[in-house]
Image: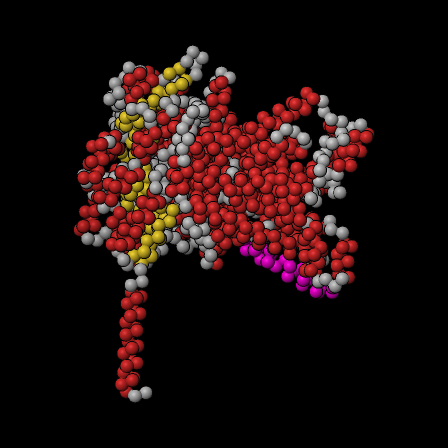
Amino acid sequence: MTRTREWLYAWLLLSPAAALLALFTHYPAIANLWHSFYSTPKGARPAKFIGLDNYRALVDDPVFWQALTNNLWYALGTIPLSIAIALVMAVWVNGRLAGRGFLRLAYFTPTVLPMIAVANIWLFFYTPGYGLLEQITGLFGLPSHNWLGSPSTALPALMLVTIWKEAGFFMIFYLAALQSMSPHLAEAAAIEGASRGYFFRRITFPLLMPTTLFVLVNAVINAFRLVDHIVVMTRGGPDNATALLLYYIFEIGFRFWDSSYAAALTMVLLVLLGAVALFQFAFLERRTHYQ
Amino acid sequence: MRGMNVGVRAPNGALRALETLGAWVLGILWIMPLVYAFWTAFHPPAFSTHFTLDAPLTLANFVKAWQAAPFARYFLNTVILVTMVLAAQLVLVTLAAYAFARFTFPGRDVAFALVLVQLMVMPDVLIVENYRTMTALGIKDTILSIGLPYMASAFGIFLLRQTFKTVPRELDEAARVEGCSPLQTLWNVYVPLAKPTYIAYALVSISYHWNNFLWPLIITNSVESRPVTVGLQVFSATDQGIDWSIISAATLMTTGPLLIAFLLFQRQFVQSFIRAGIR
Amino acid sequence: MKPWMQMQAWLAGMALAVVAAGALAQAPVEVPFFYPVAVGGPITKIIDRFAADFEKDNPGIKLHPIYSGSYQESIAKALTAVKSGDPPVTSILLSTDMFTLIDEDAIVPFDDLIKTADDKAWLKSFYPAFMENSQTGGKTWGIPFQRSTVVLYYDKDAFKEAGLDPNHPPATWTEMREYAQKLTKRDASGNVSQWGVQIPSSGFPYWLFQGLTIENGVNLMNQAGTAVYYDKPEVIGALQYWLDLVNKYKVHPPGIVEWGTTPKDFFERKVAMMWTTTGNLTNVKNNAKFDFGVAMLPANKQRGSPTGGGNFYIFKKSTPAQREAAFKFIKWVTAPERAAQWGIDTGYVAVRADAWNTDVMKQYVAGFPAAAVARDQLPFAKAELSTHDNQRVTKALNDGLQAALTGTKSAEQAMKDAQREADRLLRSYK
């Protein structure tokens, strides 16, 4: 194909996706950056250029710093754990354990239940006095605890909900990858007398790296995107202990109607995600092993 | 079909029993919310926190939930939405990934970087701007308007480009020699080989749009376009406090079909991954 | 063309024009409106029935009721629609959203629509407590529709068990504390199986807190919505009373008490007295398997409660015909009979005195006296916290209250910090 034809062909193939992306991602994102340099228009008062004022306010805002720290802890708490548990689940379901079918179903159910609905059920689990957790700890004579109502346990409680929701979803990908691994590898290892642990560490896990990268990208995106449970369970409280960045952005943008400050906060989130994405693709891409 | 444990020195009995126990404990923990939902949906509200075995069964919660909102319609809307979005995504993403994977043209890398921007700039964050755009386009309050911002999926383009790049060039050249146009090559060579990627991506997409809540709430007004998540919200934010019986009944009604589908088809579902495996 | 054929054509054309003009003139006025649902029950059906009945009486008007989620979601939808140039004609939104809507230049006052003497009388018929959040700067911006107050629900059976008179609910702060002490059941290892009293503090603790401050003599803001009084000694005192219930007398659960599960806590008899909205009345009646009572909130310096709930607003971007049509509907739906029936069906407080005098309401109260408690409390009720930049200024208070209740800050520190933040936010509105 001639250079020009190839060029034309490529752009034709790209154009529908490109048009939609430009309209619903790039244009709004740029508009967002633009708005972060202007004040919020209110009714008759138009927006005026205020330069870096929003960003200065951001630095001085204790709730923003708390939301940021919360989100980082939240990501740290949920991502490795949900991936690890997903991997363990996949290994278990893949092996010849009794009741595999049931286990597979049990692990995967959280995925089909919308967060809006299950958050309420988890609220029951955490309710002090007669909640499920209370009833169980009561059996063991442990004292009552207000999980969602104390700043120290509210965020970990929400992390558990997220891990519960995500692990089964990631398990499916690990399961597929495990089941597509050649049985010759296992046989060769057996001949060499390798232990299960050794086999897993040196062969299985490296071969699962592409899946891990795939799952990691999803997990990172979700750690910053999933805030439905906060809306139902704690509304960011107590005293911002469970405020995450995106939740704070929604609060600022859609409760306080301060669209320009929300735009500035959004830029922070974008830069953060951009940095994470860069790290993932640059560093981990190099370490994955493609067959 | 043998799993990876075959051939390796099998764990001794005690270790295996411990593992099975661990797997089961985790399984029970994981399915607890669903079990609870079943319990509360079929028992009167007085028993939603008491697990006495002889509590009376009832279908009243389902009746109340059904009357609270037109869930049948919401369910249909969600199915249409998810299918529409997935279909559009598959087409757009395939074309774009093919262009990035197999064509050389000026500005390709810049274009790809721009595409990747969408991985970080989620439509969830751009609600006000997108609402304005939808109004300008005149399609506000339609199922299409819920799905449109998501149809060009950077995640899909990235995944599929990766997969297409692993297709051996020889196959491509062979097809060309046979006289296939680039599109025919795409259809006959690349698409079949990328099937597991498509399945993985479909799973991500369906799960995302099935669960999506805030954007559909803002952009839809009428029963004809609202998805199930917005419908379920009617129980969540009341002055009167939470009635777990109704919420559970509504949840089961709306996710029941999906659960049953998974229950019946889980073998086939996983098999489709197996057949070539996700890399 | 022959002359009489010309004449015929001309006549036909005229006839057509007249018919067309008639049809155009009769094109119905479209009135879309958002409404939230914040209580249980078939609200959507009731609203749809209202719309259908109104349209029957008024064939030139087409109402489009649009369910818009909770109050929070409704204001979000309304303002998003305003900002993208496509708002509804009228909506039911929180009475406290008034300043926000004014600042966004989204609504018009009702004063231009209230012209006749009848209309003026109609406006005067609403309870003053509800009008406090509906008027500012001498204008009326909202019309009360689904309003509430905070009341005290108490477990009469638990009272009897504790040796208290079940027909005498606590009337003062001291009594409430003393009763709570008698009602709190604690076992040997210190676990509490029944708390004396609980006041929810999740989400919007400011609302319940206002009950305490009004009872201690002050409300939290001025009428113009430009100043708040979080750090007044009476306010700090009110917070200290709440904290003492938790920390000193240990009759109130620790940490943040969840609003959504408080009624359930009451049904489960985990708490003997609860502060919550009158909107829960039907819910409690249906689910409490014991004898319960409803009382006005206890007094300290005076009785008091904040009001709550939603008003009708009319949006600016609408034609005069639409505004008139919306106004007609608002008058229609707040007529005494309908206001009474709405109150009975939903648990909201009927917003006009003459609604309480209708036969259907009198019958209802005769069979269920607890329903009248909220009305009896209205003379003591004051405006709900509402200022410019309302949500943020309120959040400053909410955060402070939650910090104090979880022991992170002292009452004084929490309120002073909240005041400082609120002052900063309100500076540009003074």
| Residue at 34% across, 29% down | C287
Furthest toward the top, the residue is C188
Residue A109 occupies quadrant: top right
**The image quarter in which residue B236 lies:** top left
Looking at the rendering, in which quadrant would you find the C terminus of chain A? top right
Colouring used for the render:
secondary structure
Q: What is the x, y in percent for residue C254? A: 42, 22
Query: Is residue B19 visible to us here?
Result: yes
- Viewer-side residue, A149 vs B235: B235
Residue at 28% over, 26% down: C293
Q: Is residue C72 above or below residue A24?
A: above
**Residue interval drawn in magenta:** A1-27
Could you say which quadrant of the image residue A271 lies in? Answer: top right
As for residue A15 lying within the magenta part, the answer is: yes
On the picture, is A227 further left or further right than C159? right
Q: Is residue C247 above or below residue A193?
A: above
Which quadrant holds the N terminus of chain A?
A: bottom right
Decide if residue B82 is on the left or right side of residue C14: right
- The total number of labels drawn is 0
Q: Is residue B64 left or right of residue C17?
A: right
Magenta highlight on residue C123 = no
Dominant SS in magenta: helix
State the image coordinates of residue B173 (x, y, percent, origin top left).
77, 58
